[in-house]
Image: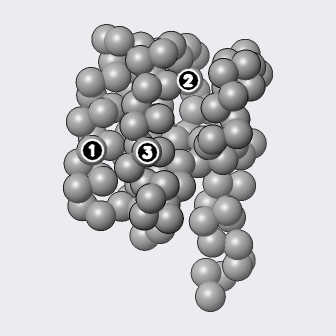
Amino acid sequence: MHLQEIEHPAAAIFQVKGRLDATSTPELEKKVLLSLDKGVRHLVMDFSELEYINSAGLRILVMVYQRLNPRGGRVIICGVRDYIAEIFDISGYNRIFSMQSDMRGALLELDPTPDGQ
């Protein structure tokens, strides 16, 4: 897995490439928890280059949701490939997380005004 964190004023954004499984989730969990400790209210996960996710990866997303939801925060997932979207559909997680087709849609969900005002 390759993980890149992108600075954004409205959310912590993580681009995840490769596989999100038991081997790679500790790195993601550590970085996400650091963001939450800094007071981040929204999390955007860009999965456009994610090739595989298993229950360990889904567990991290659920944990973040459980921490952000009571504070009015959101977990937005964008760019998922069809076969990964099917996992979210079958598991019902597509009803828990906001699913956007791309990063633009995710950022518009956070701030629907074109110029941020």
28 sits to left or right of 102: left
Which residue is found at the position 52% from the left and 41% from the top? 45
**In this view, 12 is above or below 78:** below
Numbered circle sitting on residue 66: 3
> Mark 3 or mark 1: which comes first in sequence?
1
In front here: 97 or 70?
Answer: 70
Q: Residues within 10 Å of mark 1 (few under 14, many from 20)?
A: some
> Mark 2 or mark 1: which comes first in sequence?
1
Per the image, label 1 sits on a secondary structure element best described as helix
Q: Looking at the picture, how far across and down is residue 57, in whole percent?
A: 45, 22
Amino acid type, callout 1:
Leu
Is residue 27 something that shows in the picture?
yes
Is residue 81 something that shows in the picture?
no
Numbered circle sitting on residue 50: 2
Q: Which residue is mark 1?
A: 33
Residue 91: quadrant of the picture: top right
Discs 2/1, front: 1
Q: Find the residue positioned furthest to the front.
A: 70
Q: Residues within 10 Å of mark 3 (few under 14, many from 20)?
A: some
Q: Find the residue positioned furthest to the bottom.
A: 117
Per the image, label 3 sits on a secondary structure element best described as helix
In front here: 109 or 62?
Answer: 62
Q: Name the quadrant of the C terminus.
A: bottom right
> Mark 2 or mark 3: which comes first in sequence?
2
Q: CA distance from mark 2 to mark 3?
A: 23 Å
Q: Looking at the picture, how far across and down is residue 72, in whole percent?
A: 50, 65
